Every structure is written in C-alpha cells, then in structure tokens.
C-alpha cells in the first residue's frame, strides 16, 4: 500500500512539474498575459551593459559570503545555458527558473546562477520555485521571446547527494571539484520544444 501511495505521489508531482513547464503562471514573477513573464527587457542597451565578472569565484564569495559547491553548480549551469542559447552574460535574453527546496544549501544555487548568467531575482529573469526533495532539483531556461526550446538542466542525483549538507571544512574542496568536473558528470540537459514554438 505504501508503494502504491508513493507511486501515486510521484505521478502527481511529475504532472504538476509538466504543467509548470508548459504554463509557468504559478511561478513568482509570471503572468498569464500575452507572452509569459513580466520582467526586465533583454538586449543591448545602456541598462544592460554589465560585464561578466573576471573573477567569478571571488564574485560568488563577495556576494554570497563564501563559496560552496551549490553556488559553483549554479554558476556552471548558468554558463552552460549562455552557451547553449548563444547569448552573453548580462544581456537578459533568458528566463531562468531554479527548482530547489527553499532552504540552504540548496537555494545557494540561485546565487551561482546570478553570477553565471547576470540574471537576477529583482529583474524577474531569475526565479525560485520550490520542490520537496533533492530528487526534483532542476533549472529550466528559455528565451524571453519564446523562440527555441526550453532547456532543463537536471543535476545528477549521485552528485547532489555527494554535496548535500557539506561540513564547513569541506566547502572549498567540494567547490574546486565542482569547478573542474566535466559538465556531463554534474548535470544532464533535456530539450523540450514548447507547443507555441512548434506551430
């Protein structure tokens, strides 16, 4: 009976996640109007001339107070997203939704995404959405103009369990490991074409 209840719970949660991906109106910062999100306008203009930090490690440390593997994982995913969408840091052409349990150290991934992409929570082009466990952690990224795919960056469960609740003296070692690991050992990327883009 417990196994059936667990399976049913997983099916319901997966269904909710698919619903959020196809129509993320329930995510902070979203709108049901015309496009999808009301937030900062991307592109090259005088307000979007920020420069990617040359010392990303130091920038995470200054912004977050320390560097941990969750920050670095967010930075790595942010950098991969910019590359995959062929855009640059600070242009704000992407919407990023970080699905994590809303508690540290998991939420620390959001600060890494800020340093990795130039997107911010205040501009509404980086948002947090709560999930109930490590098993559902992922980051969804798409273009603000609605063209192209939605990319889902899903960190590997084995890796997430490796960095879950690190001790203070382990932070630098785990962070350095994360910065040097192959992307394929950190996360997998799934591409989904939204129904609007297919038409």
Image (tube, helix red, strand yellow):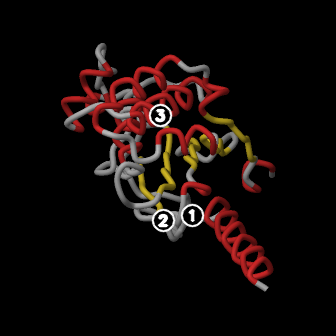
- In space, the residues marked 2 and 3 are separated at their CA atoms by 22 Å
Residue 40 sits above or below residue 174 on the image: below
For this orientation, the residue located farthest to the top is 54
Above or below: residue 22 compared with residue 117 = below
Percent coordinates x, y for residue 124 in the rendering: 37, 52
Residue nearer the viewer, 6 or 148: 6
* First reached walking from the N terminus: tag 2 or tag 3: 2
Q: Are marks 2 and 1 in contact (CB under 8 Å)?
A: yes
> Does residue 14 appear to the left or right of 107 in the view shown?
right
Residue receiving disc 2:
27
Q: Name the residue under label 3.
A: 73
Tag 3: Cα neighbours inside 10 Å, few (<14), some, or many (≥20)? Answer: many
Name the residue: 33% across, 50% down. Answer: 121
Name the mark on residue 94.
Answer: none
Helix, strand or loop status at disc 3: helix
- Picture coordinates of residue 94, whole percent (x, y): 50, 40
Q: Residue 24 carries which label?
A: 1
Residue 103 lies, in percent from the top left, at 36, 59
Distance between the alpha carbons at the discs numbered 2 and 1: 6 Å
| Dot placed on the residue nearer the N-terminal end, 1 or 3 | 1
């Amino acid at each position: 009976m417990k196994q059936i209840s667990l399976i049913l719970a997983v099916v319901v949660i997966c269904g909710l996640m698919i619903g959020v991906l196809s129509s993320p109106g329930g995510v902070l910062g979203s709108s049901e109007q015309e496009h999808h999100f009301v937030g900062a306008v991307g592109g090259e203009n005088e307000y979007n001339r920020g420069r990617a930090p040359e010392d990303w490690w130091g920038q995470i440390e200054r912004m977050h107070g320390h560097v941990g593997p969750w920050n670095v994982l967010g930075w790595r995913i942010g950098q991969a997203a910019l590359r995959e969408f062929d855009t640059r840091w600070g242009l704000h052409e992407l919407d990023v939704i970080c699905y994590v349990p809303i508690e540290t150290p998991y939420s620390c991934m959001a600060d890494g995404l800020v340093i990795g992409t130039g997107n911010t929570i205040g501009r509404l082009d980086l948002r947090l959405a709560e999930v109930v466990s490590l098993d559902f952690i992922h980051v969804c990224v798409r273009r603000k103009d609605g063209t192209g795919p939605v990319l889902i960056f899903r960190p590997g469960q084995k890796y997430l369990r490796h960095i879950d609740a690190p001790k203070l003296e382990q932070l630098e070692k785990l962070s350095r490991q994360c910065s040097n690991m192959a992307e394929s050992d950190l996360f997998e990327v799934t591409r989904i074409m939204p129904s609007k883009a297919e038409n």
